[in-house]
Image: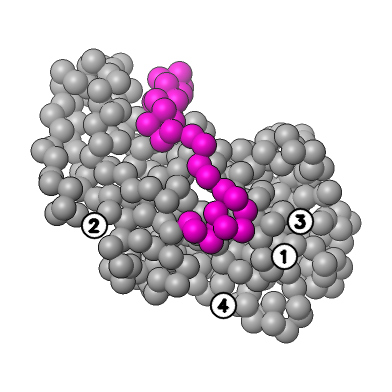
Amino acid sequence: MKVLLIGANGFAGRYLRRELENNSYEVICVDAVTSDPSVRRIDMLDPEASEELIKETAPDYIFNLAGQAAPSISWEKVLLTMHLNIDISVNILEAVRKHCPKARVILIGSANQYDGSKAADGVISEETPLNNTSPYDISKNTQEELVRMMVRRYDLDVIMTRSFNHIGPGQRPGFVVTDYCKRIVSLERGEIDTFTFGNLDSWRDFSDVRDVVRAYRLIAENGVKNEIYNIGSGKSFYIRDIIGKLVELSPKAMEKVTLPPRLPDDELVHVRADISKLRSVCDFEPEYDVFETIKDVLEEYRQL
């Protein structure tokens, strides 16, 4: 089976490529910026280029991992966020309906779309109400509504995800684990004397990126047409515990910084994904230990 992987050079894209190739798929890789000769350099914001690509390759599956993935950046780059998170998906579906209407398209959304305050006991299901509190949220929610409209009109085969936090080597700074890994390594190298902590008092669902991309493959193979799936671990992790483990892995950090005190567990909502739908349809269970994953991330930052 032939897969078109858009956003192949991104964090999750590189892992998904490996997951697909290890499962005997022919993978055609595309990214807007690349120096890798095995990845085609194509700007999917260009509707003509998108159409020509999909017409030529006629894939069985299309994964769109391209986009602007940081809610904080969306406030600084509102229009870019809208274009990347909406226009690319529309360009893909326009080309699919014309040239390969039987292809299955997997579009990646985010847990940031949810209004966590409306989740019972912090458990977020696909039915939890959505947020519109940042340009990023709005871009992803608008993407979903436009896609639903096109699916109804043209009878396309689309699956959408709402993916929770995922971590692993290769993730850029700008996320909680990578930012603290960067600080710890700077401390170890003597570039800084100490650092302070931001607010660590929240519980969130974290997964190893390898579990996440395996879930993407499984929903492509087994998921129900035009459904939305939460992708996560189904477990809640206290961010202070994750950062505390990173500090424990560094004698220098243990010497130079002091973690804020741990709050009682019952004072905070234990936010986690309800992945029962993913489990039932795809027989999915996470395989990787998040606390082992963060060790790998820290070690990678030490090698940079």
Residue identifier under label 4: 145
Q: CA distance from mark 1 to mark 2?
A: 38 Å
Q: Mark 1 or 2 closer to N-term?
A: 1
Is residue 294 rendered magenta in the image? yes
Q: CA distance from mark 2 to mark 3?
A: 38 Å
Residue identifier under label 3: 61
For mark 3, give the secondary structure: strand
Is residue 142 visible in the rendered image? The answer is yes
Disc sitting over residue 92 in the figure: 1
Q: Splitting the image into 4 quarters, where does residue 181 fall?
A: top left
Crowd tier of the residue under label 1, counting other residues whose Cα lies within 10 Å: few below 14, some 14–19, many 20 or above: many
For mark 1, give the secondary structure: helix
Q: Which label lies toward us, 1 or 2?
A: 2
Q: CA distance from mark 3 to mark 1?
A: 12 Å
Q: Position of residue 201 (x, y in %)?
A: 20, 48
Q: Position of residue 24 (x, y in %)?
A: 79, 38
Q: CA distance from mark 1 to mark 4?
A: 15 Å
The magenta stretch is: 275-304
